[in-house]
């Protein structure tokens, strides 16, 4: 038996619901667990009953309305649920939810964007250190999987135009180094582990200049796992044909 997990930055859950895009994706893909980022809504602002589809719902909305936010909908009831990483300075923006299952933790994360002028780069570096420390604490108890919009293309292979983006948010040396530290800590980028040489595999495209039609994109959405469960991952997919957001869903299947 395997479990399908999906992750999608929906760039506004009310928007993808109004378009029918999320409903269509859930109907077609039918993930056992779906993690959403950038929900941009409080739970009571969303007029859709995911419970009717068999999901338990867990929301972590930002204090600031219409901003950031994450959610997880799961058909498998978790043993426990944690919101945030336990640091008040970081936990105002609804960026992290952790579900505990019998043999692993599942974490969804929406990593802070450094902003176009990089005004949030310094804060982001602190956030990344604290988030990695949080992951390590969980991993000392049982294996982890984390997924979401990490707002970084790790290597040149992970975006269409690396040379012209070396000083831009999402591809600065500082952001890439922080992700390298996650890998150096032993965690595994599932897609790149399975597809070390694949090019043109992106999860986000600008709305400008027909970037998606031309596949001028970035791979900034990830599943990352503890090394002792990488062999349980049967499949990993990027779903660029699924529309509704400037990101597309990513999926993995994990076996017993």
Image (cartoon, helix red, strand yellow):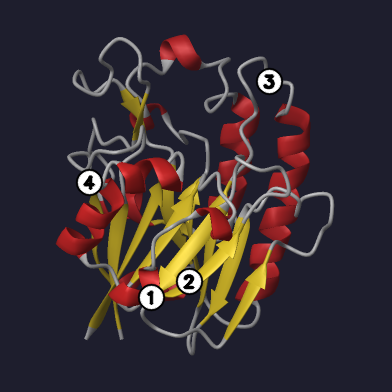
Query: Which residue sits furthest right?
Result: 88
In contact (CB < 8 Å): disc 4 and disc 2:
no
What kind of element bears circle 3? Answer: loop
Query: Which residue, given by chain and number where applicable, does mark 1 sit on?
Result: 51
Residue at x-position 27% and y-position 68%: 31
Residue 252 at x, y percent in the picture: 29, 63
Query: Tag 1, which secondary structure?
Result: helix
SS label for mark 4: loop
Marks 4 and 2 sit apart, C-alpha to C-alpha, by: 23 Å
Q: In the image, residue 169 lies at what x, y percent?
A: 57, 23
Name the quarter where the N terminus is drawn: bottom left
Q: Nearer the viewer, residue 38 or 138?
A: 38
Please determine whether, in this image, residue 246 is positioned above or below residue 234: above
Nearer the observer, disc 1 or disc 4?
1
- Where does label 4 land, which residue? 239
Whether pointer 1 and pointer 2 mark residues with C-beta atoms closer than 8 Å, the reply is: yes
In percent of the image, x 59 and y 24: which residue is there? 172
Given contact means CB atoms under 8 Å apart, are the residues at marks 4 and 3 in contact?
Answer: no
Question: At numbered mark 2, what does the secondary structure look like: helix, strand or loop?
Answer: strand
Give how far apart the Cα atoms at labels 4 and 3 are.
29 Å
Could you tell which of marks 2 and 3 lies nearer the N-terminus? Answer: 2
- Labels 3, 1: front one: 1
Q: Which residue is mark 2?
A: 57
Mark number displayed over residue 118: 3
68 lies above or below 253? above
Mark 1–mark 2 Cα distance, whole angstroms, equals 7 Å
Task: Assess whether mark 1 and mark 3 are in contact (beta carbons under 8 angstroms).
Answer: no
Q: Earlier in the sequence, mark 4 or mark 2?
A: 2
């Amino acid at each position: 038996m395997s479990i399908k997990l999906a992750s999608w930055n929906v760039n506004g859950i009310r928007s993808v619901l109004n378009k029918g895009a999320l409903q269509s994706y859930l109907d077609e893909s039918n993930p056992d667990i779906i993690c959403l980022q950038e929900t941009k809504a409080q739970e009571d602002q969303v007029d859709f009953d995911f419970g009717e589809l068999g999901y338990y719902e867990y929301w972590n909305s930002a204090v600031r309305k219409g901003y950031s936010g994450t959610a997880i909908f799961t058909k498998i009831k978790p043993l426990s649920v944690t919101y945030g990483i336990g640091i008040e300075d970081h936990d105002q923006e609804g960026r992290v939810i952790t579900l505990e299952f019998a043999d692993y933790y599942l974490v969804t994360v929406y990593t802070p964007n450094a902003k176009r002028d990089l005004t949030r780069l310094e804060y982001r570096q602190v956030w990344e250190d604290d988030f990695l420390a949080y992951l390590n604490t969980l991993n000392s108890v049982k294996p982890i999987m984390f997924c979401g919009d990490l707002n970084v293309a790790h290597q040149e292979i992970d975006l269409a135009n690396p040379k012209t983006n070396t000083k831009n948010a999402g591809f600065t040396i500082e952001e890439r180094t922080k992700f390298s530290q996650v890998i150096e800590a032993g965690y595994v980028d599932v897609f790149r582990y399975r597809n070390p040489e694949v090019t043109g595999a992106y999860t986000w495209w600008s709305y400008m200049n027909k970037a998606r039609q031309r596949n001028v994109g970035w791979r900034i959405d990830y599943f990352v796992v503890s090394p002792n469960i990488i062999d349980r991952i049967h499949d990993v997919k990027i779903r660029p044909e699924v529309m509704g957001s400037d990101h597309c869903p990513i999926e993995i299947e994990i076996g017993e």
